[in-house]
Amino acid sequence: MKVCFETFGCRLNRAEALDQEAEYISDGWKLTSSHSDADLIIVRGCSVTRRAQRDCEQLIAHIRRKYPLKRIMIEGCLATNSSAKIAVRHAPATTNGTTPVPTRTARAYLKVQDGCAGKCTFCIVPKFRGKSSSIGFDAILDKAKRFIDAGYREIVVTGCNLSLYASDGKRLPELIDALACLSPGCRIRLGSLEPSDVAQDVVEAISGRQNICRFLHIPIQSASNRILGAMKRPYTAKEAEELVRSIRRHIPDAGIGCDLMTGFPSESDLDFMATRAMLDRDPFSRVHVFPFSERPGTPAASMAGAVPPEIRRARAKELATIADAKRTAFAKRFIGKTTEIVVEDEDSCSGWTSEYLWCSCPHAHLPRKSLAKVLITAADGHKLTGTPI
């Protein structure tokens, strides 16, 4: 029996899909990338934006038209209708009482939390993910050990809202510190981190461990307090910027990412300029800019003051131009410095640096998954070239 996986969206979706792949393989299934060759197709969807949902739905419709008798399983953050042909999921396979760990990717993806307690007016995800829940502290450490034993040299910690992790009296700072202590030769990377008191403690934990990646992503969304209030985000623009400054103070060479949304209902020119000014002055190295997308069933979808789509796109383009220039400038800072990569592509000996820049080492030959120290010799845009040392 053969199974094909189609995965959309965030790292959490990717972590869940990889875990499911490992379960099916352990149960005797074979992976295939071909729809025609598959006995079962599992689509793990995403509805965070209209475009993401449309892409998922178009793929599902294409599969149904071309292969009407195929079994399809739809999972993740995607609504299904009564006509969907859903396969029954196989029970997870176990080895000595534990679920198998994925081994196909160059980096391991470790899910530690799911769901969200937030009430953000634009977000559809809680309708799919539910309230926050955390995986047990010891269970996470056990799975991380098995990832390390399987040869992984980077573990990406994922969740729906990592700041909410809490289990067995431990919070996220204690968790990442414990993960970093498992092996000095395996680095730990965090996903998005909401501005909060926990986030400040996470920054301090990262600064004290060399094998926690020097990159943090903050879903700021806007630098207008009026818009943040309308979004029901649990922080002010000042608090978000204080987190950015704390990262720069504790970890000077860290990469800092953020999400910025343009055209939220009633966003004025002044609101937009506040966000633009923040992007100009703060040291962001990787920015995800996207225009507001109405999600049916969310409060923001029916709010007054809708911003015309062309203005949303124009504002997003303006921010993206600034963000690209900042990322290029950040990359150039590393010329002549050393950093580390986990090799993902053996042919080009390339992978992500600790600071989340793509780096290639031409003419070098290192095995996939290996952690290598490199001297950066050049930067082309935001891509680096280096030499292993």
Image (tube, rainbow, N blue to C red):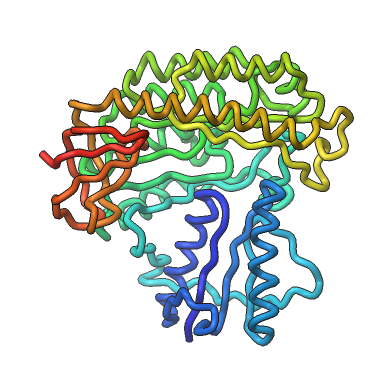
Looking at the picture, tell me which residue is in the foreground, 26 or 338. 338
* Residue 184, x across and y down, in percent: 21, 40
* Residue 199, x across and y down, in percent: 49, 25
* Residue projecting furthest to the left: 389
The quadrant in which residue 327 appears is top left
Residue at 51% from the left image edge and 24% from the top image edge: 322
Q: Is residue 192 above or below residue 273?
A: below
Q: Is residue 359 above or below residue 245?
A: below
The quadrant in which residue 42 appears is bottom right
Q: Is residue 326 above or below residue 154?
A: above
* Residue 210, x across and y down, in percent: 26, 30
Looking at the picture, tell me which residue is in the foreground, 188 or 307. 307
How many labels, in total?
A: 0
**Residue 182 seen in the current view:** no
**Residue 353 seen in the current view:** yes
Residue at 83% from the left image edge and 37% from the top image edge: 299
Considering the image in quadrants, where does the C terminus appear? top left
Residue at 67% from the left image edge and 31% from the top image edge: 314
Q: Is residue 330 above or below residue 372?
A: above
- Asked whether, in this view, residue 260 is left or right of residue 362, the answer is right
- Asked whether, in this view, residue 309 is left or right of residue 344, the answer is right
* Residue 81, x across and y down, in percent: 79, 68
- Asked whether, in this view, residue 94 is left or right of residue 90, the answer is left
